[in-house]
Image (cartoon, grey):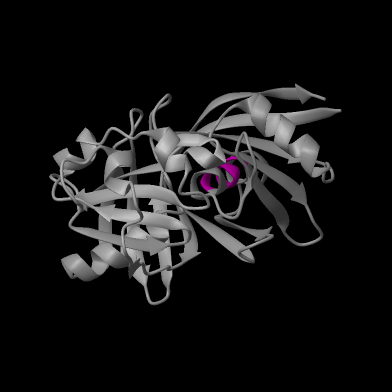
Amino acid sequence: MHIPLFHVDAFTDRPFTGNPAAVCLLDSWLDDGRLRKVAAENNLSATAFLVQGNDLYELRWFTPLCEVRLCGHATIAAAYILLNRFQPQSDSIEFRTKFHGVLKVHRQRDFFCLYLRAMAPEPCSAPDGLSEALELPSAPREVLEANDTYLVVLTSEDAVRRVRPNFGLIEKFHPYAVAVTAAGVDCDFVSRYFAPSYGVPEDTVTGSLHCALTPYWAQRLGRSHLHARQLSERGGELWCELNGDRVVVKGKAVLSMEGVLEI
């Protein structure tokens, strides 16, 4: 079987930065075991699998370990390939997903705009061992939760950079992942995201995380249009807009590799 395969760096305008995702175009669905093996072979934080249906492309996302319910950067990557290679006459595309219904991506010049449901985080008690797992010198100023993620609010951008995650300890919070965030120096807010139990020790740029971070920072900063950076080693930039119960996550993307996968 010959499967067209693309690697796309999302939330960046330069190769080898942003978050890399694999995009695989299938004629029909493989069994879940095969999909997991392909994602593991790609060895990226996410692989987007696409099957063209009667009206929409069906879309699923896998990490090297498992299927995930939502992946923003791999959706942007899939839209980049389809709108640039297969539907260049179109400015938008919709995907049918298992867990989030229909997702829409709109192309706006060099940006790809992903429309997601806002998930306003709620305050919660910090789980035992959270400060130790992040090697924080003191208790965080605020801990919230949204979409199976603990959101840890720190005092500064530098504090976010200094976090040294203990992935073995973070893994014990499963099914929760952990994110840290703070106000930015030359952007509105910054973040990092750790999900080792899903095969992603530190994600490079996490579009889905901004479903929760955007409502939080929009309320704190008093505006609905926000510029965000994720402070991973590769780094990435996002432009986010809160519009009622929806979040628009905008980013650029570049193609880094294409070929054919033989299975």
* Residue sitting at x 76%, y 48%: 51
Residue 165 location in percent, x, y?
33, 35
Query: Can you see residue 108?
Result: no
Residue 155 location in percent, x, y?
14, 50
* Residue sitting at x 18%, y 70%: 222
Q: Main secondary structure of the magenta part?
A: helix
Q: Nearer the viewer, residue 112 or 224?
A: 224
Residue 87 location in percent, x, y?
65, 47
**Does residue 77 show up magenta in the picture?**
yes
- Image height of 4 relative to 103, above or below: above
The quarter of the displayed image where residue 247 is located: bottom left
Q: Nearer the viewer, residue 173 or 199?
A: 173
Residue 224 location in percent, x, y?
27, 68
Number of marks in the rendered image? 0
Which segment did they paint magenta? 76-81
Q: Is residue 150 shown left or right of residue 132?
A: right
- Image height of 115 relative to 232, above or below: below
Q: Is residue 178 shown left or right of residue 64?
A: left
* Residue sitting at x 14%, y 46%: 156
Q: Which quadrant would the N terminus be assigned to in this image?
A: top right
Residue at the bottom extreme? Answer: 244
**Does residue 145 show up magenta in the picture?**
no
Query: Can you see residue 32?
Result: yes
Q: Which quadrant would the C terminus be assigned to in this image?
A: top right
Q: Nearer the viewer, residue 6 or 229?
A: 229
